[in-house]
Image (cartoon, grey):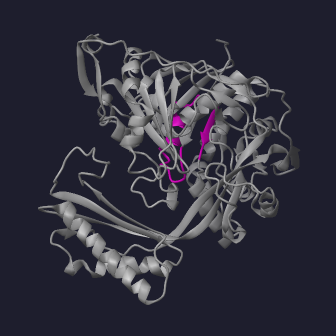
Amino acid sequence: MAKKTIKIGGATGFWGETDMAMSQFLREANLDYIVFDYLAEITMSIMARARASDPKLGYATDFVSAIVKPNLARIASSGVKLISNAGGVNPKACGEALRAVISEAGLNLKVVVITGDDLVTDLDRLESMNASEMFSGEPFPQKEKIASANAYIGAFPIAAALAKGADIVITGRCVDSAVTLGACIYEFGWSADELDQLAAGSAVGHLIECGPQATGGNFTDWEQVADTLHEVGYPIAEVWEDGAAEIYKPANTGGLVNRGTVAEQLLYEIGDPAAYILPDVVCDFTQIQLEQVGEDRVRMTHARGRGVPETYKTSMTWADGWRAGSTFWYVGRRAADKARIFADEAVTRTRKKLQAMGAADFDEVAIDIFGEENFWGGHAAVSDTREVALKVACKHQDARAVSLLLREMTGCALGAPAGMAFFAGARAKPSPVIRLFSLLVDKSALSIKLIDDESETDFSPPATSADVLPAEIAQIPEAVSSENLIEVPLETLAWGRSGDKGDKANIGIIAREAAYLPWIAKVLTTDYVADRFAHFMTTPAIDRFYMPGLPALNFLLHNALGGGGIASLRNDPQAKVYAQVLLDTPIAIPQHLLEA
């Protein structure tokens, strides 16, 4: 590997994350960059509403007040640079707020703001493209209902901002990993045609973009870290010029960094690992290898780039009515049956009132009973339990109809079957249903600008001739038959992590040993996974992808989340528990492999 390295700490994975990473990283004292990822589609809609009420809002205000301001002196003295998409839908306001606190502290730190991703004032042109939603095929939403419209820009503007001398770079909606890749491009001088390096830097960004998910958080083997998660360390990547990187955590912190924690994060929220499409490069992660090179230290190599897309993915959020729900508990004999009777009673009463008023029926009603034998499609671990949790939720275009069901759920409590309990307090309130609409926009359609306190500079993406090459698809080794098979849970043989992208769910399964993979793949066919999650999927469609480098399987479940995010009435609209469900699967494997 080349000698030059940079060290980048991943401090946040969403808006609302704890602020403990900053103290860890500043105590570590040798980082070159600290990066922050705040944005999700839901976050953009929240920020858009905030900006509509106050033109000075619409960004992650706590990045300024809770992250930068209390640590300004240490940031300045350490020389560490900050890169953040905290700008949300109002990066200029975020930049102005930062400059104000810097000036107030009497310091001289340069803030560069990147704009151009926000297309909410350009809806007429977007509509004129006659573009349907790129995944579902739905038509363009009514413009008056659209709250935000933002293109996912890439890392080269960030590198350009650093070249202008930025100490803090603020973006709007950039792709999550771009805050890391931008630092690598600037430091190593990577060009737009150095695809393997760009893919490697993107993989590094993906590994640290969700904070402690790479260092023991949400880990399959949670028992290994349970006693230390209260002081979990946040991930640091040491990156070499050729794109190789080592993931570790600050000294004297909790958590764990091993092949499992890093591999789980690599597969988190991706689709086809041979075509992970980002603004700057189409990545191929199938050959990535992870090696334990020390205690709490894992090396990543062999990321590949396959080309450069000509478009930016652009996501709009729009309001589609109202939703709400409440949770109750039922205890005693036939608890699930009693919960179902109570839920049906409340919904029936409400529907009769809506009909009497001449109002429309609900768009959707969801009744979920955790602990019910058939909750996981007949794969529940227990049956006839005496304790269940009940959730009743609904969607309607009129908030008053939603409120009516909430009232009836409380009002019929005295006439319900025995054994109901709930946490006393204020009744839930209707909230907007925010849906996602994604389309592709040509890169030339954006007007990206770099803004500091002295000037405003236009930025154009670097030219490249890197056409997207076809992927090489590896074949999964066959499981050789054996007479001495033993059946064990999948969790004995693999780590698992699941996540979401819109209405799609992904489940990554990583073999603990390469020899296990053929036996895992023999059972985990697309048909098996489709059957396991059939009760959640409106139109079952599943892709299975093989990653020989780890080795691992990644499953992409389409139309699996009831709309996803806060458009969904599901108990798990972001597929966070799907891997845990699949890890119960019994796998038959030769006994000698387990003994080895």
Say whether residue 105 is visible. no
Q: Is residue 144 above or below residue 36?
A: below
The x and y percentages for residue 22 are 53, 42
Which is nearer the eye, 36 or 314? 314
The x and y percentages for residue 200 are 64, 25
Q: Is residue 212 above or below residue 313?
A: above
Q: Is residue 229 above or below residue 350?
A: above
Give the tally of numbered discs: 0
Residue drawn where x is 27% and y is 68% of the image: 423
Looking at the image, residue 383 sits to the left or right of residue 166; the answer is left
Q: Quadrant of the N terminus?
A: top right
The x and y percentages for residue 81 are 67, 37
Looking at the image, residue 122 sits to the left or right of residue 407; the answer is right
Q: Quadrant of the C terminus?
A: top left
Residue drawn where x is 27% and y is 52% of the image: 374
Say whether residue 513 is visible. yes
The x and y percentages for residue 511 are 40, 23
Q: In the image, is residue 16 part of the stretch drawn in magenta? A: yes
Q: Residue furthest left?
A: 333
Which is nearer the eye, 335 or 225? 335
Which is nearer the eye, 412 or 302? 412
**Residues rendered magenta in the picture:** 13-37
Quadrant housing residue 364: bottom left
Which is nearer the eye, 592 or 100? 592
Looking at the image, residue 260 sits to the left or right of residue 224; the answer is right
Residue drawn where x is 72% and y is 59% of the image: 93
Q: Residue furthest bottom?
A: 357
Q: In the image, is residue 353 part of the stretch drawn in magenta? A: no
Looking at the image, residue 556 sits to the left or right of residue 436; the answer is left
Q: Is residue 332 above or below residue 450?
A: below
